[in-house]
Image: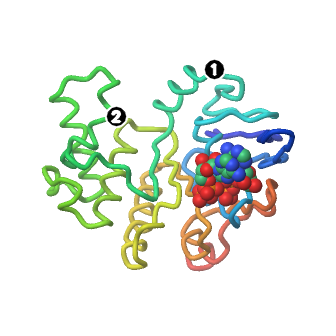
Amino acid sequence: PNVIETTNISKVYRMGTEEIHALRSVSIQIARGEYVAFMGPSGSGKSTLMNIVGCLDTPSGGQYILNGQDVSRMSDNQLAEVRNKEIGFVFQSFNLLPRASALDNVALPLIYAGLSKRERSERALESLRSVGLADRASHKPNELSGGQRQRVAIARALVNNPSVLLADEPTGALDSKTSHEIMDLFEALYAKGNTIIMVTHEEDIARFAHRVVRLRDGLVESDELNRQLAMSN
Ligand code: ADP
Ligand code: ADP
């Protein structure tokens, strides 16, 4: 089944009398368990598409079905609820709370799930274990390396078992060795059945995904399985 189905979605930003067509007509289907990169140069519409797919914004036209639910016409409150349940976000800048331990950072999204403190800690520790950081649970972000911080952020994104892991330039703040470690982790998460979408303008990072959707001027320029990967497998 498809987790994500967009049909002819468009997005128009109005700036005074000017209209900016950030997305023109984008139709994409993503099945459960796929690992997809959204690629494209600056201004091609990646952030706009990510914001819509991640339920941070709604399209101006067209339809977006997430896990069988039409989210294209939802109110902000409904959208927030769907977002918290279905989407795990990872950002370039990690966005961790500096004074909280790795465990507390990861447990944060569970506060809304109505679990006891003990259940939250257990689930957070399990999530840290899945990114190989169980032994850093009590460390604060400034006691961790950049790659470890991003792994904490990934553990936080996954702690609610979201339908989609949505990563916006996840390696943008990391050196190339650490970036590759994060790509190894994504590969392991993919192997476990997670659905992953990564937004990047870096060719070297997009090639780790199994499918690459290229945007240009608000349109899908190409949508292909990663041939290099298919050949190496
Ligand atoms: P990318 O992420 O690929 O750089 P964006 O989705 O950020 O592309 O932008 C696509 C186009 O829409 C660009 O021309 C950008 O300037 C414009 N745009 C993006 N967000 C806004 C906004 N909030 N208001 C007005 N224009 C915007
Ligand atoms: P990225 O580096 O991910 O492509 P951008 O620099 O395109 O991000 O955009 C960063 C933020 O600013 C986004 O939330 C986008 O919606 C907003 N934005 C982009 N272009 C414009 C614009 N021309 N006017 C207002 N907001 C914009």
Q: Residue 233 or 207: which is nearer the viewer?
A: 207
Asked if disc 1 is less than 8 Å from ligand 1, the answer is: no
Q: Is residue 122 above or below residue 192?
A: above
Pointer 2: what residue? Answer: 109
Q: Position of residue 82 (x, y in %)?
A: 53, 27
Give the distance between the C-alpha atoms of the residues marked 1 and 2, in whole angstroms: 21 Å
Q: Position of residue 139 (x, y in %)?
A: 15, 54
Q: Name the element at disc 1.
A: loop
Pointer 1: what residue? Answer: 75
Q: Residue 181 or 14: which is nearer the viewer?
A: 14
- Residue appearing at x 59%, y 35% in the figure: 55
Q: Quadrant of residue 149?
A: bottom left
Answer yes or no: is residue 71 visible: yes
Answer yes or no: is residue 36 visible: no
What amino acid is found at the position of numbered circle 1 in the picture?
A: Ser
Q: Position of residue 54 (x, y in %)?
A: 58, 40
Q: Is residue 196 above or below residue 39?
A: above
- Residue appearing at x 33%, y 58% in the figure: 151
Q: Quadrant of residue 229?
A: bottom right
Q: Is residue 214 left or right of residue 97?
A: right
**Could you classify mark 2 by the number of other residues whose Cα lies within 10 Å: few (under 14), some (14-19), or many (20 or more)?**
some
Q: Which image quarter is the C terminus in?
A: bottom right
Q: Position of residue 113 (x, y in %)?
A: 34, 24
* Marked residue nearer the N-terminal end (1 or 2): 1
Identify the mark at residue 63; answer none if there is no mark: none
Q: Is residue 6 left or right of residue 80?
A: right
- Residue appearing at x 79%, y 48% in the figure: 23
